[in-house]
Amino acid sequence: MEAEQPSLRERRRLQTRQELAQAAAELFTAQGVAATTAEQIAGRAGISLRTFYRHFRTKEEAIAPVLEIGAERWQAALRTVPVGEGWQTAVAGAVRAMLSPVGGTTEEGLELVRDLLVAAGEDRELADVWAVVNARSERELLAVMRERLPEAGHLTLALHSAAATAAIRVGLEAWAEGEAADDGGHPASSLAAQAYLRLSAGL
């Protein structure tokens, strides 16, 4: 059955969130989190402060849509995998594709995520947002796993979704720390895919 398309109102809401997230990310990386205010983020996005607070409770929370880079697209890619077929290979391939500049995102978008992860290493509030993003991604991925692996028990499904989410987190963080890939691919995608294959080897 074809997925229901979002309404015009929902599309506008998502667009506003993305504009605020982009503005927040650019300001945080340019002048630091402490020096950035919610007013500045709203102004850079051309949006009122009141509207900002309709979407986000804090200035740090505004970067969540940027940190969720590729999540919806790669989960959608997993939904196309035939039930029960080559799951680990499919997950690794989807992770690699969605974190590749030639796949699910852009080089500029990946670089922005890396800058934010570097900043999160020194800012607890940003680190907390990153943790929430990963927890939400794991929950959503678990639902996808249930669709594609109907015979698997809850423990197996939970381990698969935890492994995939942790792999993306670890891969991106390793790249932000300067880790290089050894297979010629983009470090973000290669490190995350390798991490997933290692983590899921015993599942």
Image (cartoon, rainbow, N blue to C red):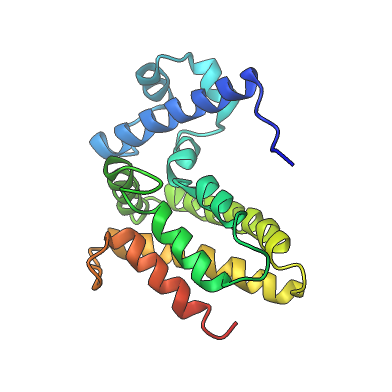
- Residue 5 versus residue 29 in the image, above or below: above
- Residue 66 versus residue 165 in the image, above or below: above
- Residue 43 versus residue 23 in the image, above or below: above
Of residues 127 and 188, the one nearer the viewer is: 188
Please state the horizontal and vertical placement of residue 118, each as a whole percent of the image: 30, 53
Q: How many marks?
A: 0
Q: Is residue 173 visible?
A: no
Please give the name of the residue rendered at 39% of the width and 25% of the height, measured from the top-left corner.
Answer: 41
Please state the horizontal and vertical placement of residue 152, each as a whole percent of the image: 74, 74
Q: Quadrant of residue 13?
A: top right
Q: Quadrant of residue 26?
A: top left
Of residues 134 and 195, the one nearer the viewer is: 195
Please state the horizontal and vertical placement of residue 27, each as a whole percent of the image: 31, 32
Q: Quadrant of the C terminus?
A: bottom right
Of residues 180 and 22, the one nearer the viewer is: 180
Q: Residue furthest bottom?
A: 202
Please state the horizontal and vertical placement of residue 141, each as a whole percent of the image: 62, 57
Of residues 162 and 38, the one nearer the viewer is: 162
Q: Is residue 167 visible?
A: yes
- Horizontally, residue 164 falls left or right of residue 145, namely left
Q: Quadrant of the N terminus?
A: top right
Please give the name of the residue rendered at 49% of the width and 17% of the height, measured from the top-left corner.
Answer: 49
Q: Quadrant of residue 88?
A: bottom right
- Horizontally, residue 2 falls left or right of residue 109, namely right
- Horizontally, residue 161 falls left or right of residue 127, namely right
